[in-house]
Amino acid sequence: MPVYIALLRAVNVGGTGALPMAELKAICEGLGFSDVKTYIQSGNVVFCSDELEKTVEERLDEALGRKMGKPPGVMVRTRKELDDIVADAPFPDAKPNLLLVYFLPEKAPSDALEKMVAPDGEEAKLAGREIYVHYPNGSGRSKLKLPGLKPGTSRNLNTVRKLAEMAADMENED
């Protein structure tokens, strides 16, 4: 059975979109997903489902929308996709906590980086449905302007690695 990783937008960030991970797990189980595991309080969940990736994404976003008042935006990836994202990470000298992967709902347009304003030396690279951004001074105070990031949700490379590891462990259990 395929292992999926769902990344939720705007969940538990700065007190908005509060969704306890136990509730997220219960919602996933209610949708018929199995072996559901959450990771940290920012809307990460790993699970198994026989359904197609897009179907899983739509059903989870819709169920969360009923719970939260509006769909938060859910990006779903397979274990292989996450492995590739980790393996293909650019900026090899970047500390993993300063390299964010923005997961987008669809492939970014080829000109997505053209309007980037990076006053603190931020670097970005397009990669299909992801945009990697290296924040040399951290993302918290960054003044980076990159409109292409808006529809997505980000995780630092350490978190992406951990989610890929969780997904691999689930596949190995089968």
Image (cartoon, helix red, strand yellow):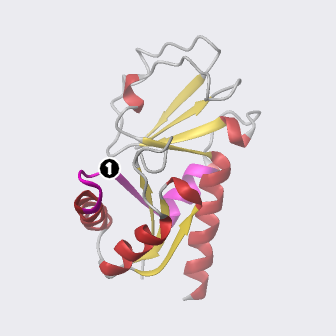
Where is residue 26 drawn, in percent x and y?
A: 39, 76
Which residue appears farthest toward the bottom when viewing the image? 174
Where is residue 62 drawn, in percent x and y?
A: 23, 61
2 over 130 or under it: above or below? below
**What residue is drawn where x is 43% and y is 50%?**
11
Residue indicated by mark 1: 73
Comparing 60 with 157, the one in front is 60
From where the camera sits, is residue 3 visible? no
Magenta residues (range) = 67-86
Which amino acid type is shown beneath numbered disc 1? Gly
Quarter occupied by residue 30: bottom left
Comparing 97 with 11, the one in front is 11
Residue 158 horizontal side relative to residue 17, left or right: right
**Quadrant where the image shows the N terminus:** bottom left
**What residue is drawn where x is 62% and y is 77%?**
169
Quarter occupied by residue 170: bottom right
Comparing 48 with 80, the one in front is 48
